[in-house]
Structure formats: C-alpha cells, structure tokens
Amino acid sequence: MGENVAVIGTGYVGLVTGACFAEIGHKVICVDKDQLKIKRLAEAQIPIYEPGLQRMVAEQLEHGRLAFTCHLPKAVEASDIVYIAVGTPSLDNGEVDLSQVKEVVTQIAEAIERASSYRIVVIKSTVPVGTARRMEQMIREGAPSANFAVVANPEFLREGSALHDTFHMDRIVIGCSNTEAGERIGRLHEPFGAPVLYTDRESAELVKYASNAFLAAKISFINEMAHVCDKVGADIELVARGMGMDRRIGSHFLQAGIGYGGSCFPKDTKAQLRIAEDVDYDFKILRSVIEVNALQRERFVHTIERALGGSVKSKRVAVMGLTFKPNTDDLRDAPALDIISSLVDKGAEVRAYDPVALSKAAPLLPQARLVEDPYEALQGADAMIITTEWDTVKALDYTRVKGLLAHPIVIDGRNCFPVERMERLGFRYVSVGRPGSAVEGNA
Ligand code: UDX
C-alpha cells in the first residue's frame, strides 16, 4: 500500500529519493524553500544533470504521485512519513554544518505538534553519529505532546547512476529504536527488493561514513600502488585485476587515477576523521587516505610538468573533462578544478572542455578558456590532458587529435586507453601506473 511521504530538500538526494518513491507507488510531496526551484520542478525542469531523472519526475508529476511545494507545514500535515534530505556541508574545520537539518527539524516539530497524529521522521541527509537521537530530543522539546519516531536511513547513491542504484541497491540500512517505525520504513522500500539491515540509529549513521571512508581508502590505496608500479615497471591495471579477483577484496573502486572528488567522499572522510577526533581517537588510516588524495592532484601536475620538459610555463594545454566523474554536472571538489588552477599558477595557458558543465564552471575557472568543441581546445595545444573519462572524450577521433596538437602528447589521469593503442597512433602517452606511462622522475 502506498504511503504519504514528504521529502524536505530537493537537492540531489531529496529529488532522487522523492521521484523514486513516487515511481514505486507512494504519494510524495517534495519541499524546498527555494521558490524558483520549486516552480521549475513543478514544471519538470530539473536543476541537476542525472540520466533518467527528468523523465521520471515528469511522469510522476503527470500521474499525480509527485508534487512540489515551498510550504513545509502543509507537506508534513499531509504525510505520515517525513524524510529530511537537506544539505550537510562541511565547515572549514571539517565539522558538519547541521544548521539546515536543525532548521527543518524545528519546523517539523511545530507541524507535528499541530497535526497531533503519529509521524515518522527519517533522516536521509548524511549526519554525524548521534544526530538522529539529538533531533528526536529537539522535536520532543518543540512538540511535547507529539507522537513520533525518528529513524536514520542513510543513502548510498552514486551521482550519474542514481536511478539504477536505487533500483539495484545492495542494502537498505534502517536505524531505529522503535521496531514498528523501523519496519514501516522497511515496507516503504519493499518494491525496491533490496536486503534490509535493521540497526540502532548510531550504527546506521556510522555505516554511511564507514562505507564512504572505506571506498575512499580503496581508491587512495590503488593510487599509491600505481606509483609503486611506475617505479618497478608493473601495470596497475593488471595488479588491480588480480587483486579484484579475490572476492574478499572485490574488483570495484580499484581504478587508479587522479583521486576522488565529488560531494561525498571528500566531505564524508573529513567528517569521519572529525567524529573520531571528537572522541579522542586518531584515525590514522583515514588521515592518510585524505592526504594521499590531495597529493594525487599535485603529483599529476608534476607529471604534466615533466612530460612537457620540466615546466608548463607558456605552454598551452587542453584539459578534457571538468566534473569529478562522468555523467554528472557536479563540480564539487572536482580534481580538474585544482589541477587547472595549479597549471595556470605555473604559467600555462589552459583551454578546457566538458560536455555538460561549462556554464557551471565559468565562474569557478575565470583563468581558463572554456570551449564547447573539444577539437577547438586541442588545436595547437602542447598536450592533451584527460581529467574526466567522459564517453565524448574517449570517442574522439584520435587521428584528428594528433593532427591538431602541436606535440602529440596525451597525459591521461583516468587510464582511458590501452597504452599500445595510443603508442601505435603515434602519441607519447602518459597515464597512471602503467608501463610506458612513467615520465622521468615520476613521484
Ligand atoms: C559516492 C558513493 O559511491 C556513494 O555510495 C555515496 O552515496 C556518495 O558518494 P559519488 O560521489 O556519486 O558516490 O561517486 P563515485 O562513483 O563513488 O566516485 C567518487 C569519486 O571516486 C570520483 O571522483 C571517481 O572518479 C573516483 N573513483 C571511483 C576513482 O578514482 N577510482 C575508482 O575506482 C572509483
């Protein structure tokens, strides 16, 4: 049976969650305080690039299972289950900024008190351990006679494949101290067909951080291994394949490159470190994971410098891909942004291409020339630099690319091509951790 669900916050997580709940038959109201955004969403105009989402939102609006409003109290009144999916950005000290969560919890408490019937409040936003418990206290103080439960239900979606991930979830984690409320949230997800793990709230909150920290650790580990491969002449792709065949290790997240970016890994690893610090625990591995990831960008810039004869000063480079990974327009903590800034600081002239994020990137990269045509970026450049493995970059005509470049040098931070193929085409091909890829003095 379909539930009435309110989803507060129409960012990436809230919008995907709302649309997918509607898709499986629930009646969903998505809430945001940004009036213009809500107006556009109600006309099925999606502010983010996520394959399949626009169509799903349009269909569910038409079916009448999805609605958008700025009016939080009305949405809470009309719903039995209230999802909180507002942003939890990092403060400068790594601490999580919970101000948006607290703001909506205050409003939810007032609405629940007025409604005087049972509500389940679910925290979907990524929050530090103990937040669900503290939000329960806040609601209790703001709504002394209210009847409610607070559940922690973290999300594990990847940008660019969020809809696929939602319908093929490895697990749903539901943290709750009230069995009945937890089970109702379990039933809400039943059509997704994923295994459900019921836990206490603190454990659920930690599963999210622990998972992201572990995945980030896999990436930093393989990136360190890639440097070792460069030194000893081994091939990181083969090493990763051999490791991944061991089911205890698994083959995913062993792709060496320029390190992780995005809205989750950088923020969540720092937050987890902070959570440990707050309880006087020095999480050494995680500290190294973060450090290695930051170094990875610097090392890539050094690789570029060395490939261009020791300096990028007055060199023209074409940077391919700005987003932190393909199939998203998200530029948050994207390695390409740091790499371009550093190249510009060192005196390079940068032309950059991205298939979807150029307008978003314009204010962030005033020093680079952003171009819509990759071939235009490559014309006369001293090197091509690949920072995001977009299909449009991989599918370029590389014979033409070679003809356009002033020097046939490709420096690939994502290992997009077999080394032999690029060498056969006549490129000097520098990639990450593969034979033939190391440049003299590689770190
Ligand atoms: C991640 C988690 O995967 C997801 O479960 C969580 O809910 C949110 O954070 P996302 O940030 O969308 O998802 O992207 P993901 O596909 O995990 O990639 C993150 C970054 O790691 C990207 O910059 C990607 O390029 C990099 N990465 C990933 C690697 O460098 N190597 C890999 O093997 C995998």
Image (cartoon, rainbow, N blue to C red):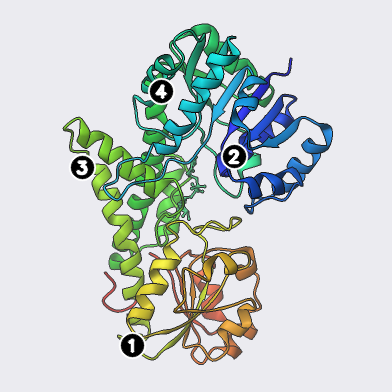
Amino acid type of the residue tagged 2 in the rendering: Asp
Q: Dividing the picture into quarters, in which one does residue 167 lie?
A: top right
| Marker disc for residue 135 | 4
- Among the two numbered marks 1 and 3 on one chain, the one whose residue lies closer to the N terminus: 3
x and y, in percent, of residue 221 in the image: 33, 50
x and y, in percent, of residue 368 in the image: 47, 79
User: Which residue matches tag 1?
Assistant: 309
Question: Looking at the figure, which quarter contains the C terminus?
Answer: bottom left
Amino acid type of the residue tagged 3 in the rendering: Lys
Position of residue 195 relative to residue 352, above or below, is above
Disc 1 versus disc 3: nearer the observer: 3
User: Which residue matches tag 2?
Assistant: 32
Amino acid type of the residue tagged 4 in the rendering: Met
Q: Dividing the picture into quarters, in which one does residue 374 lie?
A: bottom right
Residue 215 in sight from this viewpoint: yes
Mark 1 near mark 3, Cβ–Cβ under 8 Å?
A: no
Mark 2 near mark 3, Cβ–Cβ under 8 Å?
A: no
Mark 2 near mark 1, Cβ–Cβ under 8 Å?
A: no
Disc 1 versus disc 4: nearer the observer: 4
Position of residue 300 relative to residue 309, above or below, is above
Label 2: which secondary element = loop
